[in-house]
Image (cartoon, rainbow, N blue to C red):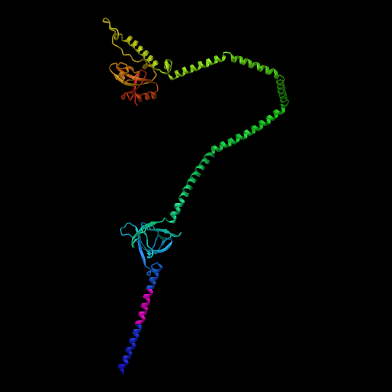
Amino acid sequence: MRQLKNKKVFLTNSKKNILKISEHTKIGFIVVVSSLILIFGINFLKGKNYFVEENYYFAIYDRIDGLTESNPVLINGYKVGQVREIKFLPDNSGRLAVKIVVSKEFKLPKNTTARIFSSDLMGTKEIALIFDKSEDYHNIGDTLFADIEGSLTEQVSVQMLPLKKKAEDLMQEMEKAIEVVKYVFNEKTRDNLNKSFASIKSAVYNLEHSSNTLDTIVTSEKGKLERIFSNVESISQNLKDNNEQITKIINNFSAISDTILQSEIASTILNAHKALTEINVIVDKINKGEGTMGMLINNDTLYNHIEDASYNINRFVEDLRINPKRYVHYSLFDFGKSVNVVEDKQETNKSSYKIQLKTSNQPIPLTPENFKGVKNVKETINNGIYVYTVGNKVSLKKIKKIHSEIKNIFPESVILNFKNGQISQIKN
């Protein structure tokens, strides 16, 4: 009996343990199923549908401007997939690889572009797939062309940029206009305007005063004006009464003018006009330097030659007076040592400037061949040295202008200053 009783107790305890295990199993099963449903629901809310077959592709971006996983992928505005994964490329370039999944029923042609764009004013990002006309299609896992549309702010900035520039230009023009107004209506201009209005007021007052004065004169001199008008009327009446006599006088003058016209006065005037025309031709030729008279008037070469000849004759006579031994030799007389003649023009108190071409211990004939074709060269003896110069100007500016041309022929030429018999060199 006791064994039977123990057996019954054992069976009862075994049933209780089995029931306890079954309850734990149920609870565990329920937890697992709930977890799976929760995971599935979360993934489903994220756009992951494990019951729909999808193809995946990649796109490489330098920046994604807020694109996140599970953002929609659209074709012509219709959602066909979503962004599944975003991660950096392993080459440390900072570029981002975006994995997108698209329903298996959609095939992507070659050269398809995945463009990121803003779908609303809040800046929510989505990817639009832009197809290219092609008969070839991408394989699963291919990398698509990546593009990114400017943000709303950038687009607004681009649209507003011309308006901004126009507004800035308008502000500049307004500033210029204000500056002009300020310049026109400155204190001096306002004073001038006040003076102008005062002058206008004074002119109006003078006109009013003049009109009053004229009215007074007309009123006071009314009798005289009436007599003047009466006299004018009388004169016109006399002209009317003597109309026939005036006509005869005019006819007589006409006959006299015909007689004068038939005389030789017209021929005389014509000849005089012809003579004046010839004189004008001659004067024009003289002004142009044509003919002997024209060259004498317009060309100073003859005057310069005469002046040079006179100057050389004076030097010759002076040298003959001081050094006759150079020209006349007497065996019984000795007139002493020769004396150098210094140009009289240097002994004046007036300062002048000349251009030194060269110097020599011996005299050089004053011919253009000895001075590289330069004419009108002068010789001056200074302390036993023969100095050969050209030009003679009181103005240093004018002599420098001549010197700039002479330096092309005589690079070593210098400017000398002649004053009070002294010669000094001018430094350029």
Decide: is 226 above or below 80: above
Q: Quadrant of the N terminus?
A: bottom left
Is 173 placed left or right of 340 in the picture?
A: right
Instruction: State the residue lying farthest toward the bottom.
Output: 1
Residue that appears at 33% across and 88% down:
11
229 relative to 289 in the view: left or right: right
Per the rendered image, the range of residues in magenta is: 21-35
**Residue 427 appears at what percent x and percent y?**
34, 26
Q: Residue at x 45, y 18 (%)?
A: 285
Asked if the stretch drawn in magenta spans residue 29, the answer is yes
**Percent from the top left, x then y, of residue 159?**
46, 52
**Going by the picture, which residue comes out furthest to the left?**
331
Give how far across and how far down residue 400 sits, in percent: 37, 25
Q: Quadrant of the C terminus?
A: top left
Is residue 264 on the magenta stretch? no
- Main SS, magenta region, reads helix
Please say if 71 is above or below 21.
above
